[in-house]
Image (tube, grey):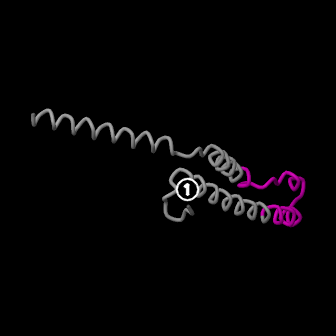
Amino acid sequence: MKRTLMIMVTVASMGLGARVLAAEAAAKPDCTEKQKAYDDAKAAVKAAAKPDLSSCSDKKGKDKTACEKPLKDKAKEDAKAAKDKEKEAKTALDCCKNPKKKGCTP
């Protein structure tokens, strides 16, 4: 009798645990849009890393330096903006995957 009762309690608890796991899996949000935004932001960071200096290649000395400086400065600003956007996208993705994470709004 005691053994049967223990088996029934064990089976009941397993069934309850399976239902809880199924409910958690069903409640998991779809984060594909946020994942795509994050991937795009990562690609933008890589693209903004190097400035296109081909327009200055035919110049020499100070003229070349004067030509490259604004291009490099713009590339630096673009890279910083891209990194900020990547960070925001990463935070949004992390919050989508785990809404209870610190810094996420419900």
37 vs 62: above or below: above
Residue 19: image x %, image y %?
Answer: 39, 39
**Any magenta on residue 71?**
yes
Q: Which residues are magenta?
A: 47-72
Determine the image quadrant of residue 33: top right
Task: State the residue lying farthest toward the front.
Answer: 1
Q: In the image, residue 82 lies at what x, y percent?
A: 70, 58
Q: Residue 77 placed where, x, y %?
A: 75, 65
Quadrant (top left, top right, bottom left, bottom right) of the C terminus? bottom right
Left or right for 59, reference 73: right
Name the residue at 21% across, 39% down: 9
Above or below, 51 against 15 in this view is: below
- Of 102 and 10, the residue lying toward us: 10
Nearer to the camera, 24 or 56 = 24
Q: Is residue 70 left or right of residue 16?
A: right
Q: Main secondary structure of the magenta part?
A: helix
Q: Amino acid at mark 1?
A: Cys
From the viewer's side, name the closer residue of 89 and 56: 89
What residue appears at the point 65 percent right and 46 percent down from the top-left corner?
39
Q: Secondary structure at mark 1?
A: helix
Left/right placement of residue 105 relative to residue 12 reads right
Which quadrant of the rendered structure holds the N terminus?
Answer: top left
Circle 1 packing at 10 Å, graded few (<14), some (14-19), many (20+), is: some
| Depth check, front residue: 37 or 19 | 19
* Residue picked out by circle 1: 95
